[in-house]
Structure formats: structure tokens, C-alpha cells
Amino acid sequence: MASTPPVDPNGSVATTGIDFPAAQRSTEFQRLRSTHRSFVFPLAVAFLVWYLLYVVLAIYAPGFMSTRVAGNINLGLVLGLLQFVTTFGITAAYVRFANRTLDPQATALREHLESQQSHRAETTQEARP
Amino acid sequence: MIAVPAVSLPIVQLADTPTSTVGNPAINISIFVSFVVVTLVVVIRASKSTATAADYYAGGRSFSGTQNGLAIAGDYLSAASFLGIVGAIALQGYDGFLYSIGFFVAWLVALLLIAEPLRNTGKFTMADVLSFRLRQRPVRVAASISTLAVTFFYLLAQMAGAGALVSLLLGIGSKAGQSLVIVIVGVIMIVYVLVGGMKGTTWVQIIKACLLVTGVAVMTVWILAMFGFNFSSILGAAVETNNNPAMLEPGLKYGVSEISKLDFISLGLALVLGAAGLPHVLMRFYTVPTAKEARKSVVWAISLIGLFYLFTLVLGFGAAALIGSDRIKSAPGGVNSAAPLLAYELGGSVLMGLIAAVAFATILAVVAGLAITASASFAHDIYTSVIKKGNSDPRQELRVAKTTVVIIGVISILGGIGAQGQNVAFLVALAFAVAASANLPTILYSLYWKRFTTRGAVLSMYGGLILSVVLIVFSPVMSGSETSMLPDADFAIYPLSNPGIISIPASFLLGFIGSITERRREDPVKQAEMEVRSLTGVGAEKAVNH
């Protein structure tokens, strides 16, 4: 079922003619979906746990966080700066993964769907503004 | 530059007690006015290609990832980040650092879970994505109301920042004088948005992001150079100036009692989960042509924002070391004046004028970004989709959007006049708490949970919104203590000053319960379409060619 533009502000004209449930069931899409989720979900949970651990340590273990590391720099500051390091690191890792693994799969699938769509458009040639 | 004396005169005359002025108001104002003139020219030039709704709301989707990344940084690094965090670190030491970390780590939620699918499935507003596979009307209305609420809290913070800055710069101590300046900032903002739409606003944000990051970088290197590039000795000097070794350890502000410890956790939660629910940040992802560019823009934003927050750590402890908390607290503008005071300490009137102009620009750009988001949400989600059922004339919709900008401008001016004197980072944290409670659960559920339903969305959005706002109203922020907005009243039943720890989990829970108890299933075809589109980008809105 394709959406009609005037009723549904989301459906763009470009998506008419694609069988989305079939596309969703296809092995290619299922592979893309699990590749995406199995990378993104654990990483999201990991950084949230690491961040919350830091917050809890800061407030409930101030003695531990006040341990001097070098000069006036204490463990709390080091752990705080490590939050920056991990954030930059996770960003780099995700971009690398998305460019190398996700994009080729997504592009192949999109091109396949768009060709399916233009094929249908040719055969059913409806009048379109 | 003929406009400089003409504009500066009436403001200076309003200053009834100019004795507390820091720096030279004439320099401050001329730098500020030149920024306004330059950006206005840019906005007017950009507006020549604003013809369609996609132009007005989404800048024709023609910005590159890099440009959009700069604009996101410009949108995100508000007065809260600059004035608020530097002030918080200068006064509360280590506890202020949590703001930097929370505001920054939060970007991973946007990068990993939201930016790309959002670009692939939406058109103009947050509600586009939320209502994609659910029933349009109730979800759109709820999303639009929560957008307006978050925008309101955010605007309060920016306007409070503007008031603080002005009182310091121009020595305007009187309420009337500060209010007049808030009116001027509000009017300029309205002009930017009305004339330039998203394109003009984006350019203002790009210019501002470059100026802000450069300005802060210069100050950071300056301070580091003063201490022989030894961060440890800045910390040492901060302890010495304030005679308080606890500055470097956690707990100075939040370690006092069990309640305040919970408050710290609540703040931490709101910060990390709020960013990805901010409607004005989400809307920026529509200004790029593809999901890949959306990803690139988040990477640019993360790099700039991370760098910026590292700089504010140096600035905050630098301000504590060179100025000391007593002088900051007693300065006009209070805690929010730490950054401009530091600039004055380093480079005198000229540097302070520059930094103040940058801070003004920051407020202006963020306010413009917020105004365009709220107006798009009202015009697109409520007017066109609900009132006109999708059949409105695009020109009419634009007119509604522009009227909304004017109304929002007026409300934010009034709110700003009311919210003077609060730490802006703290006020923004409230906006984050509302965003994390009202928006984030529904965004995540609708993108990643097949079983999610309209009832779940509506319950989660209204529940999160009402709970967070009601908790704020009954918290010490509103009443019951000296620093409250209404210091003479006391109806603070909720002991924490940030509602996040209760309202965020509650909203996730409401979304879950609402969905599993609804027997009516949502359209599986729409769900398939949304999921396939979100990951592959098929059928995503294309860029407008001019």
C-alpha cells in the first residue's frame, strides 16, 4: 500500500510503487538491520553505563575521585577527560563501521528498490504532477 | 558603520548607575553592532533563494555535512555552554565539569541512534518521524506541544544570559535597561528568522560557531601560556585564589546531602539523554541532502563541541584562579559573568568587547534557531497537518510560520525579562530534562520498537512533559529558597532541582505500558516502510535545486 501525498505529509511521491513489507522481509534487509543493531546497540549501552558509572563515582566516592595522580590533577579529572577520549573514539569507530560496512549494504538495497520502483512506474505510467 | 553611535547612545543613557561597568561600552557595542550588520547582510543574501517551504524550514536541504556540522555546533553551543559552564566551573569547580561532560557525551545518542534514520524518514519537524507509522493527529499535536515547551525553557535560558551579559557590559543595573536590551535582542532575532528562514539562520549559526570556537581557543591558549602550559598549576592557582582545596574534588555543590547527591544524578541523566531530544537540534538534520551528510555533520559537531568543552574547562578554572569566586559572584550578572570578566582580565576592553559580542551573537543565533523550530512545528504539524488536514496552501503555511515567529519572539522577550539572574547552564539543563522526558522515549521507540503504538506515544509524550514541568514548578527552582524565581513563596514539595531522575524513566515506562495495553495494532505496512526507509534512505526527501 503506497501513501498518497496530500493525505500523508510524510509519504513522499518517491516511495510509491515500492513493496515495503516484501523489502523488509528480504534477507538483504534483515542482514542490514542486524548488522546495524548488533553494532549500535551494544555500543550505546556501553557508553551510557560508562558515563553513569562516572557520575555515580563522582558523587558517591569523592574520596576515590580525589586521589592525586600528578600534581594537582586527580583521578576524577582524569576519568572526566577519559569520557572525552571514549566519546571521540566511539565516534571514529562508528563512522569507520558505517562507511565500510553499513553504507555498501544500504546503497545496494536502495538502488535495488529504486530500480523496482522505476520499473513499476514505467509499466503503470500514471499521470503525476 | 554609521549606525554605531546611533544605536549605542540610547542604551548608554539608560544606564542609571554606570559605575560597575567593566570595559568600554562603546567598544562593546560597536563590535556587537558590526556583527549584527555583517550577519544581516548574509541573511538577506541567503533569503533571495528562499521560495518554498523546504527552503524556509530546511534551507532547501542544500547544506553540506561540514556546513551543517558547524551550524549544529552553533545551535548547540548556547549561552549556557559558554557563560553558564565557565561560571559553574569557576564557582563550583569540579561539579561544574559535569555539565561539559554530559552535554558532550550526549551527542553519541544522536550519532548512533537518531541522526541518520531521522534524516531518512522525516521531512521538516520531529513530529514527521514520530507520527510516521502512528495515527497522525494525536501524535503530531503531542509532538508539537512538547516542541513548544522545550523551546520555551531553552529560550528562557538564552534570554536570561542576554540580560546578564548586558548588565555587565553596559553597566546597566536597572531592570528597565536590561529589559530594553532583551527587547532589542528579541527584535533582531525575529528579523533574522522572518527574512532569512532556515538558510539565513544557518549562516548566522555557522559564522557564530567559527567566532565562538576561535574566541574560546584564543583565551584558552592565553591562559595556558600564562601558567607555562601547565594545567596542574592553573588548578593550583584556582585553589589558592579561592582558598578552597575542595574545588578540585567532586561534591562542592552536590555533595552536601543525600538529596543533592540524587540531584547530581538527575542532572547527569537529563544532560546525556536530553540533547538527542532537542527539537531544534533534530531539525538541523533535515538541512542536509542525505543521511551520509547527516552523519558527517554530527561528526563535525562532535569534534567542535568536544574541543569547545575542553577549552571551557581551562577557562572555568582560569577564571577561578585569576578572578576568584567572590569577585565573580559580586559582579553584575553574577555567575554568568565569569567568561567576560576573564576576557577583561586577559586582554582588557578590546578582548572583553570581542568576547561579549561573540556571546551576544551566540544568544542571537540560538534564539533564532529555536524560533524557526517552534514556528515550523506549529505551522507544519498543527496548522497544516491537523487544522487543514494536509491541504493547506504552502504560502498560507509560510504566513502562519512567520506569524508564529513573531508570537514566540514576544513570549521569549517576556520570559527573558522574568528569568534574569539564574545560571543559564542550569536553566538549559531544565530544557534538557523536558526534552529527554517528552521526546526521546517516543523517538527511540518509534524507530526501534515494532510493537510501539499511538497510545504509547501519546502517553509517553504528555506524561513525560507534564511530569517534568510539574516537578520543576514544585521544585526549589520555583520557590522555597533564596535563589528561587519566587523567593517569597514556598510550595517546593519536590526536593530536587532537576526532574530527570523521575520523569525520564517514567516516560519510557509509560510508552511501554501504553503500547502493550493497546489492542489495536498499528499499520504493519507503514512500519515496514519506516524501517526500510530509515536504514536504506530510499524515498528520502531530496535537496532543492535552485
Image (cartoon, coloured by chain):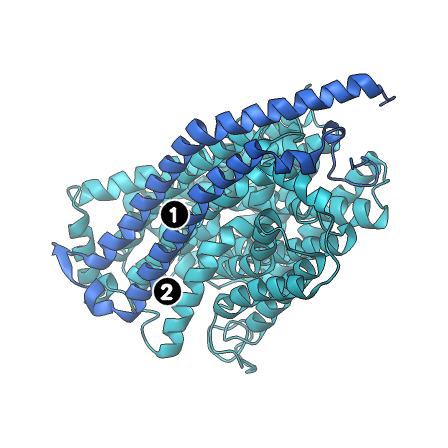
Chain colours: A blue, B cyan
Give the answer, above or below, for where B354 lies relative to B239. Answer: above
Q: Which chain carries label 2?
A: B
Q: Quadrant of the C terminus of chain B?
A: top right
Going by the image, does B449 lie left or right of A49?
right
Question: Residue B189's spot in the image, x, y percent?
Answer: 62, 43
Q: Name the residue under label 1.
A: B23
Give the answer, above or below, for where A100 lies relative to A41. Answer: above
Which of B175 and B425 lies nearest the eye of the viewer?
B425
Where residue B321 is drawn, which disc sits there? none
Question: Residue B413's spot in the image, x, y percent?
Answer: 63, 55
Q: In which quarter of the image is the N terminus of chain B?
A: top right
- Tell me the distance, in whole angstroms, between the alpha carbons under discs 2 and 1: 16 Å
The residue drawn where x is 60% and y is 38% is: B534
Where residue B330 is drawn, which disc sits there? 2
The residue drawn where x is 36% and y is 64% is: B329
| In the image, farthest residue toward the left | A71
Q: What element carries label 1?
A: loop
Q: Tell me the mark number nearer the camera, choosing from 2 and 1.
A: 2
Q: How crowded is mark 2: few (under 14 residues within 10 Å), some or many (20 or more)?
A: few
Question: Residue B526's spot in the image, x, y percent?
Answer: 71, 43
User: Identity of the amino acid at label 2?
Assistant: Ser
Question: Residue B103's spot in the image, x, y percent?
Answer: 43, 51
User: Identity of the amino acid at label 1?
Assistant: Gly
Tell me, yes or no, whether dots 2 and 1 are on the same chain. Answer: yes
The residue drawn where x is 63% and y is 37% is: A24
Q: Which chain carries label 1?
A: B
For the question of whether residue B194 can be seen, the reply is yes
